[in-house]
Amino acid sequence: MAQRVVKPKTNLGPGFWPVTAFIAVLSAVMVYLIESMPLPIGLIQAGAPADSIDALFRFLGAVAAVIFNIVVIYTVYFGIVFARPKGAPANTIGVQIHDAPVLEFWWTAIPTILVVILSIYSVKIWADLQNSQGDVLTIEAIGYQYGFQFRYPKLDKPIDEMHLQLNVPTTIHVTSRDVIHGFWIPELRMKADMVPGLINTIRVTPTVPGTYHIICSEFCGVAHSTMRHDVVIESQQNFAKWFARQGGSSGGGGGGTIPIAQGKVDLGQKLFGQKCSACHSVGPFDQKQVGPGLGKIFNDPAHPKLVNNDPVTPQNVAKIIQTGYQGDMGVMPSAQVNQLSNPDIANLVAYLASLSKK
Amino acid sequence: MATVAPGVPTGPYHAVLDHIHPEPTSFIRKYIFSIDAKVIGIQYMITGAIFFVIAGMLAEIIRTQLLSPHGAIISAATYNSVYSMHGSAMVWFVVIPLLTGAFGNFVMPMQIGARDVAFPWLNLVAFWIFPVAGVILFSSFLIGAPDAGWTEYPPISLQGPPGTNLWCVAVFLIGISSTMTGINFLVTMYKMRAPGMTFTRMPLFVWAQFATTPLLFIATTALGAALAALFIERVFGVPFYDPKRGGSPVLWQHMFWFYSHPAVYIMIIPGFGIISEVLPTFARKPIFGYKMIAFSSVAISLLSFSVWAHHMFTSGMVPWLQLPFMIITMVIAIPTGVKIFSWMATLWGGSINWKTPALYAAGFLITFTYGGLTGFFLAAVPLDYHEHGTYFVVAHFHYVLYGGSIMSMFAGIYYWWPKMTGRMYNEKLGQLQFWVTFIAFNATFTPMHWLGLLGMPRRVATYDPQFQFWNQFATYSSYVMALATVLFFYILFDSFRNGKKAGPNPWGARTLEWMVSSPPPYYNFKKIPAVLAAPYDFGNPLPYLGLDAAPGATEATPTSVSHPVPTY
């Protein structure tokens, strides 16, 4: 086959090059349209990272459109021009060609290059998302059957409303109280599953004021379909007013003082059974469940430091209960997620101290 | 068999090969508890078709419910059971058993020139597990069917109705059946090929089954373990998955997808094989790039073991771990693309006889490409943050599962129907059925892409009223799909009554199953043939020796070449 010299062009089939030109023009038009249109049409970008995710979407869309044009138009075109003519004998055969190594090389190499480009672009956007700033405002969102609650710094209790501040990089830690839920704000193109026992994190920077929806995107039970919640993106002044109405100016939790001296051992013991014993035993350090045993926490020469490298003092233990821990050793939910008030924390510290004295 | 041909060892063992077991005579041993792979294949097909009809009706209940944003007909609780059962039945009781058990059993042994599979009794057991498991699955409707989707993520599946236990048992059983079939097929293909049928002379459908078997018996074990743990946790309270008691819900997701992503390829690679048989036969030319198509199936099969966590980008795992899963997922596009381009090149320069199987193969090319491309959108991690758990995903996997697997099965049934029954179907109705299915399918599932992107999550019984128009559009289109399916069964019924006698080889195909009468005799081949070459050279004489061919089964000598030779 390979040695046979045949004049090109005419042999590829009648109209091959016009069809190829048509594919090229159509693809160019579609790429132009895709790149110049806000996609998905009808869904606004309410802030970062919607813009970069949409840019990746348009880029992939353009590549996909070109490939799809090639496959569909050539398939239809081959199907028409190489259809057996009416009246041709039934044993008419086609061109007996088995392969064409050069062609096959290129249709393997070009998709490979495309995959490399698309991977690099996706990794770049991914890295931007991972490195994006979010820590100015940190919120915890907790899913339950069937709704969402939110914890803001300096608020003692979880609240049922979510407001975000315009242009403020925000970190949202999501988790769940019962089953897996999803936390999805389509206008921000961001989502994380709310998994009980895990804390997933997303970072957003809202830029367009308005009221949008948080939608549960993981099936969570009978009322899953109705599990949605408003999220308000508003200016700094409005946010401050709203936050004050929630009691945000009253101080208290967050960095507030923990009355360690007033901790009650019996209350702490009860709380420990409810909130801590799923992961921590009251045995020695090595009696591990999810986390270490805490029975000798204040009296253990082998472990003079907490997991965050702070020395073991009542203040530091209270602090880690309050902030939680996420790092190489694992995850411990914060007091907000565990729904522990400052007096609760004090009671727990008192209980742990009493254990270490035994 | 005195002929010595290049590459064909001959010798005294032919006497052994030519021994034919006597055919059973009792009705029960012949049609119910048969050990004949062809009968078992048809049994799989009938059972799978029954489950397909039931699961299809469930799909229409889903679509009817979504006519109204407030839910048109049933309560949310019932709806949840309906879609969970639709998914479970379609995946485990329709697509997987049909593509492996039905087509594999009927076609593969004949294509390799064998009389049966390696372990016929194992085959019998594997088949009979299937209807029993199906009855167990559907009987869960009596005690409260599972409601957490076909994926049954804990902890919600721990709260699920009692039928969830039956679901575990049924899926576990069908997993055992799959494992048996996988081992059986692998040994059959490895040990029982006719003399001279080297690996590179195997038909591509056989290659596809060959690439599928490791998935069947390796990946399924992970599912079995996960299901056993779920069952034990639900019934005996051992906390594998409940985070409140020290379990990990994400553990289930890893185990489940370690099976279920390879399962996606169990559901498509045999379909690739069907397309690779149909296209050369109807284009009257060799499959383009035989080796590339064969090896790319194996490549996809191997790669499919290392992409499972792309279902879990939002579930919570170490962020950097998302990257290898994303990149390997994208890499699978390369062998898949090679296949698609090779099939297009097979059409090029053909003398295409546009019969229904060929139309379905071409339709497959278009819809499967579409589904593959949207898969790319889901593989890219940042886009998945938006698209995960939405109707975009629903659209994507229906494009690959209906537009890929089911379309290829339609192609396969029309293609091998004359071989199974000895009768032709009504060609005009077949083509009509293709066009109605193709158009209605696209109209049903295309709108779901933008529904998902605009904010409609999956698995919802009610939805935002702004999405009503496109949901109604999809629902009415799905009714047309249902009509086309009714027409399909009418065509098969009509073929029994009015179909012309097919003869051994109505399509002029060249693989071995077409060299025997239709329907094939119990023993397939009176003499095991010797194989001289790959089967797709339409210009050459048939590459088989010693074939005791049925009359009229040979290929006519080519009399004209309709197109010039290529330029390269």
Image (cartoon, coloured by chain):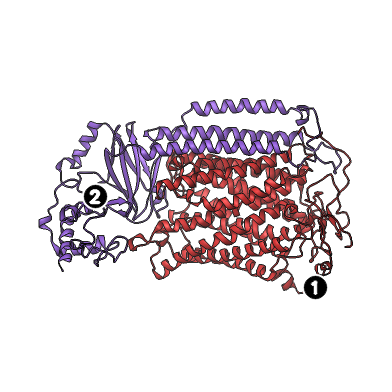
Chain colours: A purple, B red
The chain holding disc 2 is A
Residue type for callout 1: Pro
> Which numbered tag is attached to residue B22?
1
Q: Is residue B393 left or right of residue B201?
A: left
Q: How many labels were placed on the picture?
A: 2
Q: Nearer the viewer, residue B371 or B286?
A: B286
Q: Quadrant of residue B371?
A: top right
Q: Position of residue B541 (x, y in %)?
A: 86, 49
The chain holding disc 1 is B
Give me the residue at 63% from left, 56% from top: B212
Tag 2 residue: A323
- The answer to whether marks 1 and 2 sit on the same chain is no
Query: Can you say which quadrant of the picture contains the C terminus of chain B?
Result: top right
Give neighbour class at mark 1: few <14, some 14-19, many 20+ (Cα, 10 Å).
few
Q: Position of residue A266 (x, y in %)?
A: 15, 65
Q: Is residue B459 left or right of residue A140?
A: right
Give me the residue at 77% from left, 32% from top: B567
Compared to residue B353, the image places residue A265 above or below, namely: below
Residue type for callout 2: Thr
Q: Position of residue B136 (x, y in %)?
A: 54, 67
Say whether residue B57 is visible: no
Give me the residue at 79% from left, 71% from top: B23
